Every structure is written in structure tokens, then in C-alpha cells.
Amino acid sequence: MSLADQRRRHLQHFAGFVPLAWRNLVANKPRLIRSTGGIGFAVLLMLMQLGFESAFFNASLELIRLFDGDLFLQSAAKYRFATREPFPAADLDMARRAAGVASAWPLYADWHDVFWKNPFDGKSSMVRVLGIDPAHPVLHLPQLDVAPAKLNALDSVAIDRRARRFLGMSRDPKEAELNGRKVHVVGSFALGPDFENDGTVLVGEQTFAQLLPNPAGGPPEVELGVLKLRPDSDLAGVQRALAASLPAKIAVLTKAQLLELERKFQADVSSAGPIFAMGTLVGFIVGMLISYQIIFTDLSEQMPQYATMKAMGYRTRYLVRVVLEQAGLSAVLGWVPACLVAIVLFHIVGNIALLPLHMTVKIAALSFVLTLGMCLISAVLAVRRVIAADPAEVF
Amino acid sequence: MALAWRILSYDKGRTALAVAGVFMAILLVFVQLGFFIAVPQGGMLLYDKMNFDLLIASTGYEYQAQPGQFAKSALDRARAVPQVAEAAALYFGQAKWQSGEDGKAPDVFVIGFDPHSHIFAVDDINRQAGVLERPDTLLVDTATRQMFGPLTTGRIVTIDRRIMAIGGDYVLGTGFMGLGVILVSEPNFVRLFPYRSLDQVNLGAVLLKSGADPAEAAGALRQALGSDIQVFTRPQLERQETAYWTTRTSVGLLFGSGLLVAFVVGIMVVYQVLATQVSRQLPQFATLKAVGYRDRFFGGTVVVMSLLIVLAGFVPALLAAAGVYSVIREETLLPVTMTGMRIGAVFVATLLMAGFSALLSMGGLRRADPADIF
């Protein structure tokens, strides 16, 4: 082992793994704040775009997630959840008697035919109506503050207190009108609007039948059949058997399939995906430019130091590693505050816009990977300077 | 000025990088602004392609796809108003297109009108007025989604259990009317919706005699039609639609906050660039200070530098944004256009960006102490 090697080992041991990168970073406090701010804002931009995108898709999936069932029946012609395509109640009765099925209860729903009259200003607006059999509610509406059985009484309704404010549902009305019918508000829940529905009203089977009578007479037709299976039954087997025994115009779906159908529809028809993906990309590029700028400046300023270390016998590989470590550290330093600010912003914007804007592990992880990526790529681009550092030139 | 230019041209690579950053930021502002303004205008798409001076609607009118309805007799009363040349009825309905791909039945927006009324300023539609008169025949918008299956002329489709023929297509755009839009004549409209009567219309399109003042005529119409009917001039209609989409839905907030973030990111980028330049030239600035130049001089130099960078980024960003707009326009048929107003607004935003960042980076300069450096 040569003397130079020994010294290098000693020095590397002394410098440790991260400290040099860390010291470089904190050597100039104003610059540190500036670079953290710059990277942080780029990260915030990406986070906002990622958050909006997931809120957009989640808003339409939120209701489906609330259904309490193992298998679901709906018309095979249904191309998305929020469109009326009911099927005869007799088909649901048939499914209830099938082997392996413990229970099968209906959800009635309508999106485009019921108008809610705001009791405070008299304005009518379209609302989503969900109908249940009060004895067998098929969904868990968040924070529902009334026993479903109360909806048995004709014209008793529960309303969404997170509905868009112009509907007046958040102001605790006692009476209102649906399609000209006087209804009594017996309770409320906190669901929230999505991109197409401003508010939701929950009613019992009887009230639903009065609001939207079955043109063929008899009980209302079913929008979604919610099935629970016996504990020991095989999901795929029951699904196959049901699909075979029910008419072809009924689709038998698992919850995952139901969600996938909706997600695919939203992705296919809306331009939300590309719009937000583009925003994220712009954040990435801006972040890359900023961090390149920072690393490049930093390297130019410390060129004498790097050259000195080179002259002392440090390998280029080690110096490159220091630069990359430094980039990684600034990524973390920019990401952490941006993430915290984003959590606050999501909360505020989510409450104002009544959107399901949440910081999820997925968004956090994805934004972190992007941040790290943009900092490392710009470090790789900037590090050529170090490789070229010539001790002889510096002094 | 000369000093600012020298500093910037001294290190061309760095300046190019700075301009690239500013370019991205301004482009982002343009695109977000484009969405912010254009998305609400999706509701104006149909109106922009229609011939009318005033629009009559029920007081229940919310936005184009939820217009409410009123008695057709109101149109007769409107025709009796002296300034009115013509008043045509428009019927809207929602039906199931039961011939979609994979057995799906997507919702289709149905517009019923008198094919000879020339309500639409679309050649394809007026040319095919005769086709619309055939029983159970429809024209389909070319922007109708793929899930509706092929839109070929002559194809037989089932709509709300009724067998109809596609008689042709036209280019208008579906806007916020839904995934697919079809046009039918009035008789075919009631065949499709047997529970609807032609006596209840959704909208009335009024053409005025030449020379009549729309605002004045609107007043006369309001007098003649009574309180359960509203009359929109074109500017009023645009305000109504835009207000609906920006305030009632999340669209405004979504792109509004995008706009804000883009602006802040722009400030950060320019500031970053300026601060770097200033700190790199600190010895030189300090020397100038020692020689007797005042802080004001440096302030001016930094402001000029930031303006130069921002202007250099603005021009290519404007060109790129025009390109992005035309892509969006083709994809969505939304009226995303580069107007003088928009250019002006972004330009002002850009100057603000430059100003803020110059202000931020001035701090380091003021602290520059000749004694520290040497």
C-alpha cells in the first residue's frame, strides 16, 4: 500500500460518508435557503399537480368505495357508475337465492332527474339521489347521523352537509323540496361533491319510488345490487355461477372490477390525466433547472477546494460521489418542507373546493422519487466540471 | 444597462440556462391561464356556433346543458316585438345510445330544432337540412367519443330503444354537453322523447332586425315576456356560463391555483438566476462600490438583468404556448386562443415576476462589502 493510498484511506475515514457533502451544503446559509426554496417550490408544483390528479379520480371513486358488499350486479350496458341504467328487482331476488349468497340488497340511484330546491333562496339544482331499503342499507355514508330506519317514513331524507354551499344543505335545513315534493330532512352525512354532482340526497325505497316512479309500475328498478357472500364461499366461483344463471344483460362484478370500470372511463374520456401529468413534468423540468443552477454554482465556487483534494490524491470517483450526495441531500431538504406545505395546502384547498385532496403515501413517494431524480440528473450534468478540475489550473 | 448586458453575455451557457428556466415558467403560466379561461368556455362552444343576437331561457337556466324550459307561446310573443326578425326554438334531451362499443350504452345529448331555421352557423348542418327531415334520422357530432362505435353515415343505431339512422356528421364539438351529441328535427325529437311536447322549449334563439341594439331589444323582450323568462345578450350569456363553471364547479379553483403556483415558480426561477449572477459577480460589484458607485446603480443593473432574462424567456414561451394552444384546441375543440388580452396579462405577470425576483436578490448586493472581499 503506497503512502498516498494510506493517506487517502485515512482522510476518507476522517471525512466519513456524508459529512463533506453536508458541510458543502451548509457552508453558505443564504445559498442553502435559496436552493432549498427553489427546489421546494418545484416540488410543491409537482405535489399540487399529483394531488389534483388523484383528487380528480378519487372524487368519482369515493362513492363506490363506500358500498358494503363482495359482489355487485348492474346492467351490462352501464359504461360508468353515474348514469341511470336500472335492472328489474326480480333479477336481484334471483341472485339472493343463489348458492353462496348470504344477502343481496338494492341501491336505487339517479343523477339527472331530481331537482333540490334550496329552502334558503328557493333556487332549484340537480342533485344525486341514492335510495336504499332502510332495513338493509348497502353503503356506509361517512358520519351519517341518523338511523337508516328513519328513512322508512315517506318523504324523509338525509342530506350531504359537505355538498356545494349553494345548495344550502350545509345550513341544516329542516324542510326542502325535491321535484316539487315537500321532504323532511331527518339527518345528514359528510360525503362531498365530485366533478359532476354538487350534492347528494339519501332516501328510502318508498320515497324513491314516489320521486321516480317505475314506468312499468311496481317497485322501483335497481341501479346496483349489493351482494354479500357466505363466509365459506368462493368469490370467483359464485361470480361465475351468478353470471351464468342471470340474464346476459346483467353484469356481475367484484368491487375491484367496479372501481376499475369507473377509473378506466374517467381516464379515457377526461383530459385530466394528461393535463396534470403535463403540470408534473413542468415542475420536474423547472426543478431540474434550478438544482442544476445550484449545483453548478456551488461547484464553480468550490473548484479550488475540489482541485486541492484531487492534488492530495482523492480519486475523481470520490469527488463525484460527494457531489451526488450533496444533490441527494438538497433533494431531501427541498422535499420535506414542500411536502409539509402541500399537506396544509391540500387541507385548505380541499375544504374550499370540497375535493378529496389528501397527501397519500403514493403521492409522497412518487414526488420524492421525482425530486431525487431531478436533483441527481442535474448533478450528473453538472459534475463534469469536477471531473475536468485540474489542480494546476486553479493555483 | 450596458453592465447588465455584459454580465449576461459574459457567461452565455449560464444565461441560456436561466432563459430556459424562465421560458418553462412563463409557458406554464400561459398554459394554466389557457385552461383557466378556456375550460369554462366549453359551455360557450354551442352558442359560438349559433346565429342569434339574444337568447331566451327560463329563469331556471343554470348553464347550457341545464337550461330549464318555458312555453313555446313566449316565442310568438317575442316575434311580435318590433326589433325581432326571427325567434327559433331549441330542444335539449338526454338519451341512451344503446349501440355503443362492448354492449355499453353511453349517454347522448340530443338537440332538436327546425332544420330550416338556420340556427346553426355550421355549413355541415345547414347543407344536410334535407337529411334531418327524413324520419328517425340524425346528424352526429364528429367529436362524439369512440365508445359510441363507428359514426359512419347509414349506420343504424338504437337510441332509447328507438331505431334511428345516422344521416351524416358535422363538426362543432361536444363541449360540456357530454360524450356525444346528435342533432334531430323537431318531429324526430318528439318521436325519440314521446313524453316531451314541442310546446315546452328549452331555449329560444332570437335574431334581431339589422340595426337594432341588442341591449335595448333585450329590454323590450323582457317587458313582453314577463318575469318567468330571462333574456340574455351575448355578453351576458358568456358571463353566466363562465361564472357557472368557475364558481359552481372546482374548475376555477383547480386551474386558478395552478396559475398561482406557476407564477410563484416563475419568481423562484428568476430569483435563483439573478441571485447566482449577483453572488458570482460580487467581487466586481464590491469593487465598483469601493470606487464610488451607489446602491441605486446596482439596483438598476439587477432590474435590467432580470428584465432581459425575462423578456428573452417570454418571446419563445409565447410561441411555444401558441403551439400548445393549437394542440389543445384540436383535441378538445375548446376555444383556447391566444388573445391580445391574454398575452398582455401574462406579460404583466412576467414583469411582476422580474420585479419580485430583482427585489429579492437585491438584498445580497446591498450587503456586498468591499472590505470583506479583499
Image (spheres, rainbow, N blue to C red):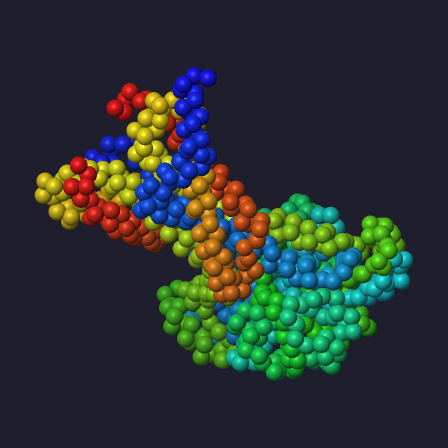
Q: Nearer the viewer, residue B61 or A94?
A: A94
Q: Nearer the viewer, residue A385 or A15?
A: A15
Q: Determine whether, in the image, residue B143 is placed left or right of residue A203.
A: left
Q: Provide residue B212's location: percent of width, then percent of height.
A: 38, 68
Q: Nearer the viewer, residue A102 or A316?
A: A316
Q: Provide residue A392's location: percent of width, then percent of height.
A: 29, 20
Q: Residue at x 61, y 75 (%)?
A: A116
Please say if A175 is above or below B274: below
Residue A182, image quadrant: bottom right
Q: Residue at x 54, y 69 (%)?
A: A164
Q: Determine whether, in the image, residue B256 is placed left or right of residue B1.
A: right
Q: Residue at x 34, y 28 (%)?
A: A306
Q: Determine whether, in the image, residue B244 is placed left or right of residue A153.
A: left
Q: Provide residue B240's location: percent of width, then percent of height.
A: 46, 66
Determine the residue located farthest toward the top in the rendered image.
Answer: A2
Circle count = 0
Q: Provide residue A386's location: percent of width, then percent of height.
A: 37, 27
- Specify the quadrant that holds the C terminus of chain A: top left
Residue B130, image quadrant: bottom right
Residue A393, image quadrant: top left
Residue B315 seen in this snapshot: no
Q: Nearer the viewer, residue A133 or B231?
A: A133
Residue A227 seen in this snapshot: yes
Q: Residue at x 64, y 70 (%)?
A: A143
